[in-house]
Image (spheres, rainbow, N blue to C red):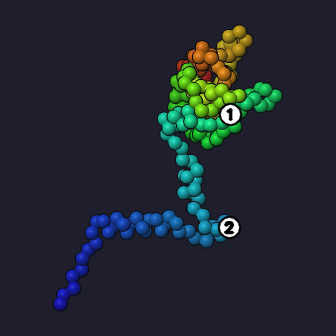
Amino acid sequence: MSQSTRSPGPLRLVASASLFIGLAACTRTSSDRSDGADTVSGARASSLQQATAPLAVLLDSIRRLSGDFHLVGGGSRWDFSGDQSVFAQFPSHGDSAVVALVDCLGDTSRVVASTRGEPVTVGFMCFTALQRVASYEWGQEDEVGGIWPGIIEPRATPDQLRQAQRAWQEVIDRKAYRLE
């Protein structure tokens, strides 16, 4: 009776390779451990921390963020009481985020977030995210009536939103902003 040796099929090879790679990713030497606890390897943990949602997803997400805008710092700036994680992801998109956020500055649609019980606009949410991504130091030549129109408040009117959008578009056109 002859014994036949059968080579593993392609599916079995893929499954075996996947299992081997998975085990190798979880295996560490004792020098990899800082406190003896079972943790994800440093390289993998770092890549998980750096995961950022696509820009389109972030732009859509700001419409559903709940929270309230309130004045802080002696009434000098607006702070958002809700989840900051969406806003925190915009800077990783750099210049693309600046352009996309300026594009939505003029949007007067209302969102879930509010100030004093009144929903704010998509435009203001985009402005809030934009402040995390870019800055611009304006001069008197940029001001209209002593104020630069690129800075808005939660209750900005549709006209103020459009003015802010135009002001920031000029900044983009001149490449005069600095990424944060």
Quarter in which the N terminus is drawn: bottom left
| Image quarter hosting the C terminus | top right
Residue 52 versus residue 37 in the image, above or below: above
Looking at marks 1 and 2 on the same chain, the residue that comes earlier in the sequence is marked by: 2
The residue located at (71%, 28%) in the rendering is 116
180 is higher (above) or lower (below) than 46: above
Numbered badge on residue 8: none
Q: Which residue is mark 1?
A: 68
Labelled pair 1, 2 in contact (Cβ < 8 Å):
no
Examine the image and state in which quarter residue 144 appears: top right
Residue wearing tag 2: 35
Q: Residue 171: horizontal and vertical position, in percent?
A: 59, 20
Q: Is residue 86 left or right of residue 21?
A: right
> What amino acid is labelled 2 in the image?
Asp
Mark 1 or 2: the one toward you: 1
- Looking at the rendered structure, the secondary structure element under dot 1 is loop
- Taking the spot 75% from the left edge, 29% from the top edge, the residue there is 71
Residue lying furthest right in this view? 74
Residue drawn 71% across and 33% down? 79
Residue sitting nearer the eye, 86 or 138? 86
- The local crowd at label 2, few if under 14, some if 14 to 19, many if 20 or more residues have their Cα within 10 Å, is few
Q: Quadrant of residue 29?
A: bottom right
Mark 1–mark 2 Cα distance, whole angstroms, equals 40 Å
Task: Find the residue positioned furthest to the bottom.
Answer: 1
What percent of the width, then of the height, locates residue 174? 57, 19
